[in-house]
Image (spheres, rainbow, N blue to C red):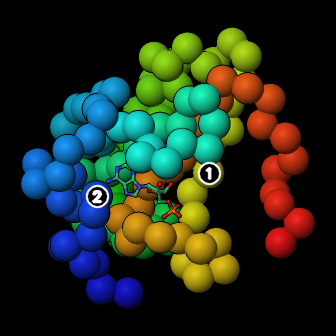
Amino acid sequence: MQYDRNNVFARILRGELPCRKVFENEHVLAFHDINPQAPVHVLVIPKGEYVSLDDFTAAAGPAAIAAFFTAVGAVARQLGLAADGYRILANHGANSHQEVPHFHVHIFGGRKLGPMLSPG
Ligand code: AMP
């Protein structure tokens, strides 16, 4: 799948759309989800152009992948979620209902999160 430079997260990265930023470094941006599914629902995105986890893990180098997941853990700690626990989730493709075609990891926390998957 070709990367769409007009997807909503690309526009946030370019500053064309606002976000409620919680963390940023040279590799990633993290911000609150606009439609939170838990008391804490934050998205972490790489600054590079990757459509999904599949694209990211196939095309990004090990340094970029390490930097990304290091940041995910740091964001969760910064949000105060490490002690009580949290869940991360990354959707790829049609079966997962991925909506935004720029790779992102969701961080959910702030309550007991229930079963891992809905019945479908
Ligand atoms: P996914 O289904 O994994 O692609 O999730 C996309 C997520 O992006 C959803 O949880 C949306 O609520 C969220 N989202 C869409 N537009 C925005 C936006 N402008 N700012 C923050 N989150 C957004």
Look at label 2 and name its amino acid. Answer: Phe
Q: Is residue 88 above or below residue 86?
A: below
Q: Tell me which residue sits at (38%, 71%) in the image.
A: 101
Q: Is residue 106 above or below residue 77?
A: below
Instruction: Specify whether tag 2 is near ligand 1 (CB below 8 Å).
Output: yes
- Viewer can see residue 107: no
Q: In which quarter of the image is the C terminus?
A: bottom right
Binning the other alpha carbons within 10 Å of mark 1 as few (below 14), some (14 to 19) or many (20 upward) gives few
Question: Where residue 5 sits: x, y (%)?
Answer: 18, 73
Q: Tell me which residue sits at (73%, 16%) in the image.
A: 84
Question: Where residue 86 sits: x, y (%)?
Answer: 68, 30
Instruction: Specify whether tag 1 is near ligand 1 (CB below 8 Å).
Output: yes
Locate residue 96: give its quadrant. Answer: bottom right
Asked if residue 116 lies left or right of residue 81, the reply is right
Comes first in the chain, label 1 or label 2: 2
Give the SS element for disc 2.
helix
Q: Name the residue under label 1.
A: 89
Q: Is residue 114 above or below residue 56?
A: above
Question: Where residue 14 sits: x, y (%)?
Answer: 11, 53
Look at label 1 and name its amino acid. Answer: Leu
Q: Mark 2 points at which residue?
A: 9
